Amino acid sequence: MGALRSDIWCGVFVRRHNDLGNMCVVVRRGDPIAGQVFIEVDHLDGTRSLYTPAPMASLRDDASLIFQRRFSRVEAAKVSERIAREIDFDPDLWVLSVDLRSDDVGIEVV
């Protein structure tokens, strides 16, 4: 089975969180087919977490995306700086933002 398109995966993620009552938006649209996805979590207490694609995740046989937690409950500027640096390197990047008090983003994390 091939990898799921980035635009479809992001649309499902946003819809699922909004259906659960968590405000979730696409902050930046990347390449619709193969853009990497970064997820920024605003914990609504002044801190944010950042999830980025896990290294070597593309070698899996299934279509699921696997993430790593890059930052956990840090100041917002640190997350914004990391995203800006990554966009300079890879302009096809997707950025999703979700307001969530808990740490359960509903993604597979290694």
Image (tube, rainbow, N blue to C red):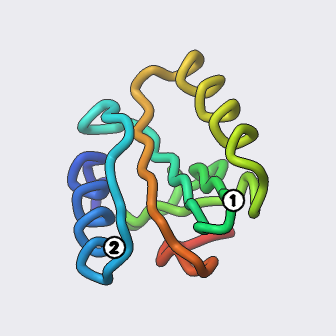
**Please, which residue is most extreme toward the front here?**
45
Q: Nearer the viewer, residue 28 or 52?
A: 28
Work out which quarter of the rendered image holds the N terminus and state it: bottom left
Relative to 76, residue 82 above or below: above
**Residue 92, image x and y in percent?**
40, 26
Q: Nearer the viewer, residue 65 or 77?
A: 77
**Under tag 1, what secondary structure?**
loop
**Under tag 2, what secondary structure?**
helix
Find disc 2 in the rendering and name its residue: 17
The tag earlier along the polypeptide, 1 or 2, is: 2
Mark toward the viewer: 1 or 2: 1
Residue at (63% x, 36% y) in the render: 80
Work out which quarter of the rendered image holds the C terminus and state it: bottom right
Find disc 1 in the rendering and name its residue: 46
**Residue 24, image x and y in percent?**
35, 61
**Residue 5, image x and y in percent?**
26, 48
Kind of residue indicated by mark 2: His
Mark 2 nearby-residue class (10 Å; few <14, some 14–19, many ≥20)? some
Q: Nearer the viewer, residue 44 or 87?
A: 44
Q: From the viewer's perspective, is 33 left or right of 82?
A: left
Q: From the viewer's perspective, is 87 left or right of 91?
A: right
- Residues tagged 1 and 2 counted as in contact (Cβ below 8 A): no
Residue at (57% x, 80% y) in the render: 104
Q: CA distance from mark 1 to mark 2?
A: 20 Å
**Please, which residue is most extreme toward the top here?**
88
Residue at (61% x, 56% y) in the render: 51
**Residue 28, image x and y in percent?**
37, 35
Q: From the viewer's perspective, is 90 left or right of 43?
A: left
- Residue 108 sits in quarter: bottom right
Relative to 18, residue 24 above or below: above
